[in-house]
Amino acid sequence: MYCRASDMQKERRLMQETINWLSILVRWGHVIAAITWIGTSFYFNWFDLRVRPTQDPVTKENNRGTIHEMHGGSFYYHEQYWPDRDHPRTLAHSGPAQFTFLSGLALLALLYWASASIYLLDASVLNVSPVTGVLISVLLLAIIWPVYYALVRTIRSERIFSLCFAAVVLLLCFVCVHLFSARGAFIQVGAMLGTVMALSVHFVIVPNHIKMRRQIQQGQPLDISLGERAKRVSTHNNYITLPVILAMLSTHFSAVTGSALNWLVLFLLMSAGTLLRHWRNVQFKTDRSDHRLLLAAAALIALGIGLTRIPSSPGSMPAGAVASSEQIHQIVQNRCVTCHSATPSSPLFSSAPLGFRLDTLAQIEASAPLIMARAVNSKEMPPGNLTQMTDEERAQLGAWLQSHQ
Ligand code: HEC
């Protein structure tokens, strides 16, 4: 009996280590693909806005503009044109978008869906089973692109479209923090925006490229509206990039995820990202900088920072005496050390998460600011409150840490 139990434990650890390694490798690939995709998106967006008509002789038919560049010690010359005939070596750039999407989905599944009770859910926000939580996450991912594309198709004005889509994103931020753990919610919002971008490539940009190419190959006149439709969603992607990166990195910003109005702070910071993108794009197009956009972005960031000063209430702080060091050690032993130990007893971890250990009082004291941020000023730790830490314990821990700093 004893033997079987320890075999099972070994199996679990092996499984956990496999997931760890898979997530390291997939994350590596995901970031590389995302950088490549975003780099290409930024480059071509910049190109389209920077290209200027020329009086000089050109090599291609139906020339729309040219651009001269220098990079890495060489000079380059590009022409933008509508072709009359096919060039067999016309290269496309959809690979990184597809790989970013698939690797992102794999990461979501490996971490947030496979360990939903730790990463995705928080019973104090919504008490549902991991399976239900994952289904909600999948459902939201599945509906976001149809919603986005319905707006694209029905609203011609880019200004009105932007306002409507911003309203959708604001609603998503609000809904997600009321369905998932703060960290899960931010990643869910990022994943949904990333899904919009990737499915626009898959369902609009790539098919339109294929149709245009075919028209040229068959000697038919080129339907430029196909290119314009692809360009529209591609430009949206360019604007969504900065918000997505922010949401994806947000698990490192406990000051944001842990604040009371975290959904609004996330939205404000993402909006600032979009404004910064617009500021650059206007500059590329007009060769002049519109400082009002920069100021507006700075104002949104300042407002976001201001809102993070409102902490999510961890319960009433103790009126009386500070708990003794022994009591604090015991609280941390009971609530944290199942995971944050040199030898975690939790079957979910084979080593302390992020190498962060709280076995001794000295370690607890040395990590006071981190613990304050994650377990006192916010309730991010323990994840999903798996070890059922009480508000009173958080308050005691907070008071003790403050008196030992
Ligand atoms: C069920 C396992 C589990 C328990 C219990 C747990 N944590 Fe964590 N903790 C994690 C995981 C996983 C991470 C890494 C992911 C993250 O940052 O959210 C983490 C990260 C942290 C970090 C960030 C460390 C760094 O270097 O950035 C702090 C601080 C932290 N935990 C504090 C605590 C405290 C304090 C407790 C007890 C009140 C606690 N945790 C209980 C799983 C746990």
Image: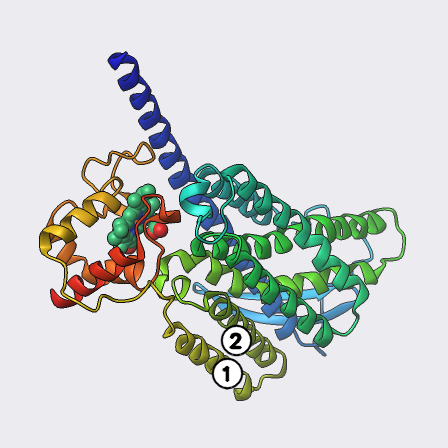
Q: CA distance from mark 2 to mark 1?
A: 6 Å
Which percent across, then down, holds residue 197? 62, 55
- Toward which corner of the image does residue 275 lie, by quadrant? bottom right
Question: Helix, strand, or loop for circle 1?
Answer: helix
Q: Quadrant of residue 160?
A: bottom right
Give the position of the C terminus as an image quadrant: bottom left
Q: Which residue is mark 2?
A: 276
Instruction: Report the residue marked by disc 1.
Output: 294
Foreground of the two, 21 or 47: 21
* Residue type highlighted by circle 1: Leu
Is disc 2 in contact with disc 1, using a CB cutoff of under 8 Å?
yes
Under mark 2, the amino acid is Leu
Percent of width and height locating residue 338 = 25, 39
Whether 359 is drawn above or below 85: the answer is above
At x 71% / y 69%, what residue is drawn? 58
Circle nearer the N terminus (2, 1): 2
> With 342 as the anchor, is 96 left or right in this view?
right
